Image (cartoon, grey):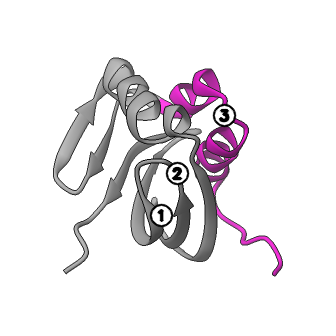
Amino acid sequence: MSELTVPAPVQAMVDAINAADTDAFVAAFTEDGFIDDWGRVMRGRDGVHRWAGSDAIGAGARMTLLTAETEGDTTSVRFAWSSRVFNGESNGIFVVDGDRLASFTIPPNH
């Protein structure tokens, strides 16, 4: 499968997860960026860092983008995730602000 084309900040976050690089993961977000994981919101650099440690890099995560559609500053994706916390597919919504991510949301699967 060929790699999808997504905005650079989205790719930077995915690459940071797959490289287990917490510093690069946090750097992919704006100072006031946030992650909303099924309604659990982690705000700012400290919150993003905590999520990276508990749910992503610290859990040995691997993320593979399956589909991606970008409209304006928003990229909606379907991704495969493998970690010690969760394994399976989810939807994700990235909002880009300049050269960084303003947010990454994983909505509840209903």
Dot 1 and dot 2 residues touching (CB under 8 Å): yes
Q: Residue at x 59, y 44 (%)?
A: 13
Q: Is residue 18 above or below residue 90?
A: above
Q: Residue 79's x, y, as percent?
A: 53, 69
Q: Which residues are magenta?
A: 1-29
Q: Residue 81's x, y, as percent?
A: 53, 61
Q: Is residue 98 above or below residue 8?
A: above
Instruction: Say which residue label 2 marks.
Output: 83
* Badge 1: residue crowd in 10 Å (few <14, some 14–19, many ≥20): few
Whichever of callouts 2 and 3 sits on the residue coming sooner in the sequence is 3
- Kindly identify the amino acid type of the residue bearing the numbered disc 3: Ala
Dot 2 and dot 3 residues touching (CB under 8 Å): no
- Quarter of the image that includes the N terminus: bottom right
Name the one closer to the observer, 11 or 81: 81
Q: Is residue 17 magenta?
A: yes
Q: Rounded to the nearest whole Å, what is the CA distance between mark 1 and mark 3?
A: 17 Å
Q: Rounded to the nearest whole Å, what is the CA distance between mark 1 and mark 2?
A: 6 Å
Which label belongs to residue 107?
none
The residue most toward the right is 2
Q: Is residue 46 magenta?
A: no
Instruction: Say which residue label 1 marks.
Output: 87
Q: Residue at x 36, y 25 (%)?
A: 50
Q: Residue 6's x, y, as percent?
A: 65, 63
- Kindly identify the amino acid type of the residue bearing the numbered disc 2: Ser
Which tag is nearer the camera, tag 1 or tag 3? Answer: 1
- Quarter of the image that includes the C terminus: bottom left
Which label belongs to residue 20?
3
Q: Residue at x 61, y 77 (%)?
A: 66
- Kindly identify the amino acid type of the residue bearing the numbered disc 1: Asn
Q: Is residue 29 left or right of residue 5?
A: left
| Residue 57 in which image quadrant | top right
- For residue 75, say whether it is visible: no
